[in-house]
Image (tube, helix red, strand yellow):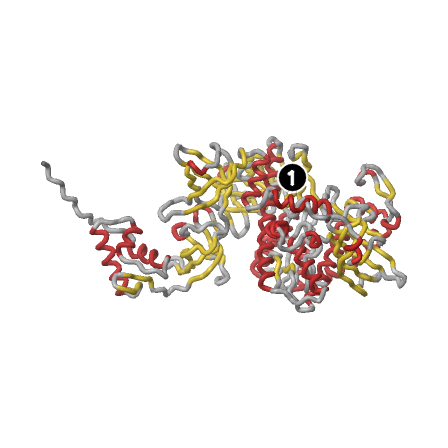
């Protein structure tokens, strides 16, 4: 019988043991640990390792870095101040934390992320690096995950699968057991939910919720955009059923409770392709020479009753989402395109702001309340514009909704012309008090029946658009003012002043084009921003400067805490005019009616939570809308791979230059690796790449000629080949 060989004791030293023990104790700082529990967490069980842990615990105790709470049970001594912030992931697994406790973002190395993901709310502590003296941080606890569902492409192996998430903000793939792939096939794009992230696992564990289709297919990518932001694709069956059973008839009993304005001349002005009309204007000349102007908004709150599944669904959505090829509505079609749409020649329940105004656009009287209205006419913006420009009732064939020239009703045409005059006076007054004029060019696509982009056009704001805008702004302002001056809880649309450092960064960029901003006081900032936007109008750098100026602004949001609206230069401003597509407007209608009925002020805290939810959902919808535009731009460029385009350099980095094509606003990247005529280095001070030998400079704002190198519909990425500088003829 052979003797069993004695196992030699392991004398391997456990590396980085001090930091590891401190990390374990700090991570769960309200619990105590003995040496066995720490050994288990380290995955060691031999005598040598245990002895090292026991010895290290005693050393840390004597240094007063940990305390022995009970015999053999240790706890971290917390001398560190902990902070809370939001994770903003960078590339390669590192990131930053945005926290109100610090003026600058705190860098987090990948080994200090501790399984936090982009957008998570986390607890962290900050420390100064000895070598660089910069503040860095370590995440100690995940307070709230930003999301639990991700879109990606599935790779299937024999007994498991991995989902590789779309986008560059997710630094890990997701492990999916084979019994949780939900009939997905290799290479499918799927929606996956995170279920667990075991202590020692490199990747989180998940399960496939839905198969979206094959990557690159149109519907797959559009559904993927919605799924990425947790936005719905359709209404639950029970919600549709509930909506379809609502009584949408106009009854004598309900009319008796409202101001009857069906005899007042009323019309709508909307985009040519609009399917829902949530606002109308009425116009009447009074005997005393004043004008009575009604801003009539679909009375959504009449149908959308609190506590119903329909209201719950509308609140969760909080907004309609406008993608390039479709609208994902906040309300089912029976309401959004039916009962709540102020269609021509139909009676509708409305909620109205009615003003008596003189020729100087001064308000002499105002009234708010529920009404019933009848729309006499429907105009497209182009038709109303033709009336304004010709000062007549003629609608030429090329802008007519019917495709044939016709004469509009003279009374309606006269109303449009007078309303335009009053709107221009109101706009001038707004601008003189410091409002900022953002008329950013919108990119739109002509789509064929299969939703393929066959052309690009730009939507610009003309007098007819501005007419509607001014009266909607007036209603929103006066409703906010009416409740705000009563010091009662209300839903405001607020917009803070721009940050000084962002204004300075904007000056750095626009200074390259010869523009100068004046930062002396609030009014001079507004005036110089307006001058800047006016001066760049029609120039090659317009879109770049418009975009950068908008990014300089604070983000408008919903709140019960009124700080005014900087961009509009209003002390009070609410959203009242679009309850079909915005839940905050529904809340504003309900609160306004409650106060008109003599109700007491409601809970500010409850409404602030609803405001935060609405702001968050609006933010997600905006991101989805941008992604759908980017996706469609790339599809459009796929069919133009052999063409050369003139573009403006819209961004410069050490890895390449970003170029925006002037003719269609599509933006792509030229990699520095592909610029083979020289070795180019990034010059941060001049926003430029400069050739080492030739000294050729490619600088922000320069015009260049590019060609499409690669289009990636899945990653929504466009690569260009640089032909060279554009020589103006």
Q: Is residue 134 above or below residue 159?
A: below
Q: Nearer the viewer, residue 645 or 620?
A: 620
Quadrant location of the N terminus in the rendered image: top left
The residue that label 1 is drawn on is 325
In this rendering, position of residue 641 left or right of residue 159: right
Q: Is residue 671 above or below residue 590?
A: above
Outermost residue toward the top in this view = 642
Q: Quadrant of residue 261?
A: bottom right
In this rendering, position of residue 444 left or right of residue 267: left
Q: Position of residue 297 (x, y in %)?
A: 74, 53
Q: Residue at x 49, y 42 (%)?
A: 192
Q: Residue at x 76, y 61 (%)?
A: 368
Q: Is residue 570 visible?
A: no
State how many labels appear: 1
In this rendering, position of residue 729 left or right of residue 92: right
Badge 1: residue crowd in 10 Å (few <14, some 14–19, many ≥20): some
Q: Nearer the viewer, residue 185 or 625?
A: 185
Q: Position of residue 663 (x, y in %)?
A: 66, 39
Secondary structure under the numbered disc 1 in the rendered image? loop
Q: Position of residue 116 (x, y in %)?
A: 44, 51
Q: Residue at x 85, y 50 (%)?
A: 412
Quadrant location of the C terminus in the rendered image: top right
Q: Is residue 75 visible?
A: yes
Outermost residue toward the left in this view = 1
Q: Nearer the viewer, residue 407 or 30?
A: 30
Q: Is residue 519 above or below residue 667?
A: below
Q: Position of residue 347 (x, y in %)?
A: 79, 49
């Amino acid at each position: 019988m052979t003797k069993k060989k004695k196992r030699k004791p392991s004398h391997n030293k456990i590396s980085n043991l001090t930091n590891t023990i401190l990390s374990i104790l700090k991570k769960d700082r309200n619990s105590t640990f003995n040496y066995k529990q720490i050994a288990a967490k380290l995955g060691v069980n031999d005598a040598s390792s245990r002895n090292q842990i026991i010895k290290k615990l005693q050393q840390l105790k004597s240094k007063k870095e940990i305390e022995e709470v009970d015999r053999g049970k240790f706890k971290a001594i917390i001398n560190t101040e902990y902070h809370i912030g939001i994770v903003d992931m960078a590339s390669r697994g590192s990131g930053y934390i945005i926290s109100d406790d610090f003026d600058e973002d705190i860098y987090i190395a990948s080994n200090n992320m501790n399984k936090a993901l982009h957008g998570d709310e986390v607890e962290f502590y900050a420390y100064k690096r000895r070598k660089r003296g910069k503040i860095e941080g370590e995440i100690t606890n995940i307070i709230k995950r930003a999301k639990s569902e991700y879109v990606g492409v599935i790779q299937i192996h024999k007994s498991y699968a991995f989902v590789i998430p779309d986008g560059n903000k997710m630094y890990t793939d997701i492990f999916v057991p084979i019994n949780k792939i939900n009939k997905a096939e290799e290479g499918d794009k799927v929606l996956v939910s995170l279920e667990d992230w075991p202590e020692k696992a490199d990747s989180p564990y998940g399960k496939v919720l839905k198969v979206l289709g094959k990557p690159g297919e149109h519907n797959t990518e559009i559904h993927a955009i919605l799924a990425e932001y947790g936005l719905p694709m359709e209404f639950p069956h029970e919600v549709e059923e509930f909506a379809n059973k609502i009584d949408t008839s106009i009854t004598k009993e309900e009319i008796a409770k409202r101001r009857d304005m069906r005899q007042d001349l009323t019309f709508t002005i909307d985009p040519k392709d609009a399917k829902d009309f949530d606002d109308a204007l009425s116009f009447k000349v009074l005997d005393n020479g004043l004008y009575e102007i009604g801003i009539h908004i679909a009375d959504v709150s009449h149908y959308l009753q609190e506590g119903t599944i329909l209201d719950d669904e509308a609140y969760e959505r909080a907004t309609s989402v406008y993608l390039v090829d479709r609208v994902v509505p906040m309300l089912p079609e029976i309401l959004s395109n039916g009962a709540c749409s102020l269609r021509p020649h139909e009676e509708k329940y409305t909620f109205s702001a009615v003003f008596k105004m003189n020729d100087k656009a001064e308000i002499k009287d105002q009234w708010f309340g529920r009404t019933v209205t009848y729309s006499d006419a429907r105009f497209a913006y182009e038709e109303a514009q033709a009336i304004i420009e010709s000062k007549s009732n003629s609608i030429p064939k090329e802008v007519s909704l019917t495709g044939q020239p016709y004469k509009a009703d003279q009374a309606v045409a006269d109303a449009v012309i007078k309303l335009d005059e009053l709107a221009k006076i109101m706009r001038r007054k707004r601008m003189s008090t410091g409002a900022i004029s953002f008329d950013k060019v919108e990119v739109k696509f002509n789509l064929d029946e299969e939703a393929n982009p066959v052309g690009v056009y730009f939507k610009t704001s003309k007098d007819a658009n501005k007419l509607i805008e001014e009266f909607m702004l007036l209603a929103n302002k006066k409703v906010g003012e009416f409740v705000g001056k009563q010091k009662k809880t209300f839903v405001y649309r607020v917009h803070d002043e721009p940050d000084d450092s962002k204004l300075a960064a904007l000056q750095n960029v626009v200074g390259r084009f010869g523009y100068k901003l004046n930062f002396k006081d609030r009014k001079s900032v507004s005036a110089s921003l307006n001058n800047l936007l006016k001066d760049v109008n029609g120039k090659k750098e317009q879109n770049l400067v418009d975009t950068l100026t908008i990014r300089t602004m604070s983000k408008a949001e919903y709140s019960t805490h009124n700080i005014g609206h900087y961009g509009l230069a209003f002390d009070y401003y609410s959203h009242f005019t679009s309850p079909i597509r915005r839940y905050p407007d529904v809340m504003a209608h309900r609160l306004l009616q409650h106060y008109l009925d003599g109700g007491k002020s409601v809970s500010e805290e409850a409404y602030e939570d609803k405001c935060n939810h609405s702001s968050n959902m609006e933010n997600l919808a905006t991101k989805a809308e941008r992604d759908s535009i980017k996706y469609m731009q790339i599809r459009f460029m796929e069919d133009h791979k052999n063409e050369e385009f003139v573009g403006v350099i819209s961004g410069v980095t050490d890895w390449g230059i970003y170029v925006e094509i002037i003719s269609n606003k599509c933006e792509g990247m030229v990699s520095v690796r592909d610029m083979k005529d020289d070795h180019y280095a990034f010059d941060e001070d001049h926003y430029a790449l400069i050739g080492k030998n030739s000294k050729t400079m490619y600088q922000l704002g320069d015009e260049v000629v590019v060609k499409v190198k690669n289009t990636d519909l899945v990653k929504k990425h466009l690569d260009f080949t640089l032909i060279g500088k554009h020589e103006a003829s």
